Image (cartoon, grey):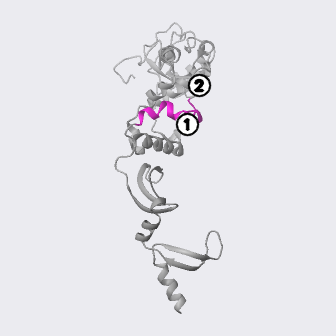
Amino acid sequence: MGAFVEAAALSREEYLVAAELDGKPTESRIYLALPLSREELETHFANDITREDVLAWDSTARAVTARRRRRLGAIVLEESALANPDPAAVAAAMLDGIRREGVERLPWTEEARRTRSRLAFMRHLDPAWPDVGDEALTRTLDVWLAPRLSGFRRWDDLECLDLGEALLDLVSWAQRASLDEWAPTHVQVPSGSRILVDYGDPTAPVLAVRLQEMFGQASTPTVGRGRVPVTLHLLSPARRPVQVTRDLAGFWRTTYFEVRKDLKGRYPRHPWPDDPLAAAPTRHTKRRGHGGT
């Protein structure tokens, strides 16, 4: 009973000096030990106690935690919040958090995604352009993202970043100046509308446009300074796809007349000319002011 009482008393001590163990590496049973007070520990091991600042990404809080610790080997004697951590260390911890969370989970806006897709299209045309895939962007975080992380400690702080503009830091000034010429954000169609180009597939950019706005256009619009014909998604007046083609001239010669029969029945108030190349492009019905769009 005495040994049990003594062991129970020792279990309440903050520190122990274990003199005899059973030799098991992870869950050793202590056979002989003495209590050690904090004052004794500080006195006898003063030269071995170190202080360190620990900055790390907390995946639960999705934030950088900054703590100051006093340690004796693996034993943490004291720990407190670090009020003014080194900005470079904070940025490094943020980058580590982004790597852990994944570049794809960054708060990409639609505009930033379009910039990324345009850059991917340019790399498809010319390997000298930077790789903007997830793996490559993760490897180059120090180049394109780190300079913009000053003062950031939480994932939510990233919401204010212009990630598209950050990506452009990967390209040279000459490349940046030529981007709009090679990968325009919009293409003007015969009706006068400027239609957004979708570069989601860098091998086949898409232009989704209402069929009637293309009347009079003999050939497929292009990007890449005329090298790459877009994939046309020709739409009904209700903006539903009626044909997908990269050969607009061939569509006018053949498939248009089959599509025209169906559209004429479903949208009788819209013009469906016998000769689409001679017709004026339009965004409206036959009689403007009566349901035209």
Question: Is residue 1 positioned above or below 138 on the image?
Answer: below
- Residue 280 location in percent, x, y? 46, 9
Q: Which residue lies furthest to the right in this view?
A: 23
Q: How many labels does the image show?
A: 2
Q: Which residue lies furthest to the top in this view?
A: 278
- Residue 275 location in percent, x, y? 54, 9
Question: Is residue 188 positioned above or below 113 on the image?
Answer: above
Q: Name the residue under label 2.
A: 202
Q: Residue 251 sits in which quadrant? A: top right
Work out whether residue 20 can be spotted. yes
Q: Which residue is drawn at 46% across and 74% down?
A: 36
Instruction: Examine the structure image and report whether residue 166 is included in the region drawn in magenta.
Output: no
**Mark 1, secondary structure of its residue:** helix
Disc 1 or 2, which lies upstream in sequence? Answer: 1
**Mark 2, secondary structure of its residue:** loop
Q: Residue at x 57, y 80 (%)?
A: 32
Residue range of the region highlighted in magenta in the rendering: 132-149
Instruction: Examine the structure image and report whether residue 147 is included in the region drawn in magenta.
Output: yes
User: Of the residues shown, which amino acid type is indicated by label 2?
Assistant: Pro
Q: Which of marks 1 and 2 is in front?
A: 1
Closest to the observer, 258 or 113: 113
Q: Mark 1 points at which residue?
A: 138
Quote the CA–CA distance across marks 1 and 2.
20 Å
Q: Residue at x 53, y 15 (%)?
A: 182
Badge number at residue 1: none
User: Of the residues shown, which amino acid type is indicated by label 1?
Assistant: Thr
